[in-house]
Image (tube, grey):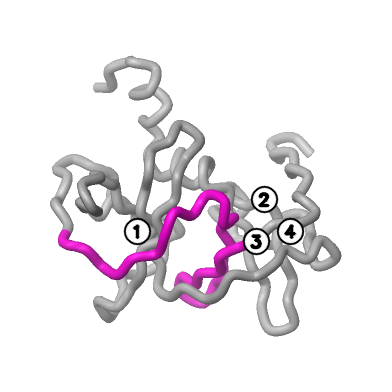
Amino acid sequence: MAGLMPVKKMEQSSELLTCRVGEQWLGLQVKHVREVVTPQPTTNMPLAPDAVMGLINLRGRVITQLDVRKVIGLPDREEDSFRVAIVETISGEDFGLVVDEVGEVVELDVDMYEKTPKTLDRVWQDVSEGVLKQEERVVVLVDVERFIAMTIPQMDAIDEGRVLH
């Protein structure tokens, strides 16, 4: 079992915002989601990782916008129709996660919760806290902190004051 991350014990009562990227549904714990917004004007960030779509100004807050499709290796969207889930990290920084569709808020049913299956695509395994099996779909529960760290690996070094070259 080397290399597997321990699964956090899921709270007995937790709400999830469901979102779709490609054919995969994912769940974000509502306590990390500030709001969902429509596409905003974006300022490009030179030399940023591919998944960084740029910066948006949301009511005076500058937010880094990340394309979930790029992180998980899906092709670009054919349409400009998407939503942005604004999530807050433990450090208090906000990020915009760009998804194809926002579903509904669902209650986490611990009876339907399972540890992350080994058959799940590797990138989802890396950011998953487990899966929620529903009748019509499987929702991957995303650990926002791991997702952002995987997308912007330099964040830890920047936060610690180290300069990257």
Q: Residues within 10 Å of mark 2 (few under 14, many from 20)?
A: many
Q: Residues within 10 Å of mark 1 (few under 14, many from 20)?
A: many
- Give me the C-alpha separation between circle 3 and circle 4: 21 Å
Identify the residue at image location x=72%, y=63%: 108
Look at the magenta stretch and give its main secondary structure.
Answer: strand
Mark number for residue 129? 2
Disc 1 designates what residue? 67
Q: Position of residue 162 (x, y in %)?
A: 33, 15
Disc 3 designates what residue? 15
The amino acid pointed to by label 2 is: Glu
Q: Position of residue 124 (x, y in %)?
A: 57, 56
- Give me the C-alpha separation between circle 3 and circle 1: 23 Å
Q: Callout 3: helix, strand or loop?
A: strand
Residue sitting nearer the eye, 11 or 149? 11
N-term-proximal mark, 1 vs 4: 1
The amino acid pointed to by label 1 is: Asp
N-term-proximal mark, 3 vs 4: 3
Residue sitting nearer the eye, 18 or 78? 18
Splitting the image into 4 quarters, where does residue 13 fall?
A: bottom right
Q: Position of residue 49 (x, y in %)?
A: 28, 44
**Do the CB atoms of the residues marked 2 and 4 lie less than 8 Å apart?**
no
Disc 4 designates what residue? 117
Residue sitting nearer the eye, 86 or 8? 86
Q: Callout 4: helix, strand or loop?
A: loop
Residue sitting nearer the eye, 17 or 122? 17
The amino acid pointed to by label 4 is: Pro
Q: State yes or no: residue 32 in magenta.
A: yes
User: Where does the magenta region start and end?
Assistant: 16-41
N-term-proximal mark, 2 vs 4: 4
Identify the residue at image location x=38%, y=23%: 159
- For this view, does 89 lie left or right of residue 94? right
The image shows residue 90, relative to residue 12, as above or below, that is above
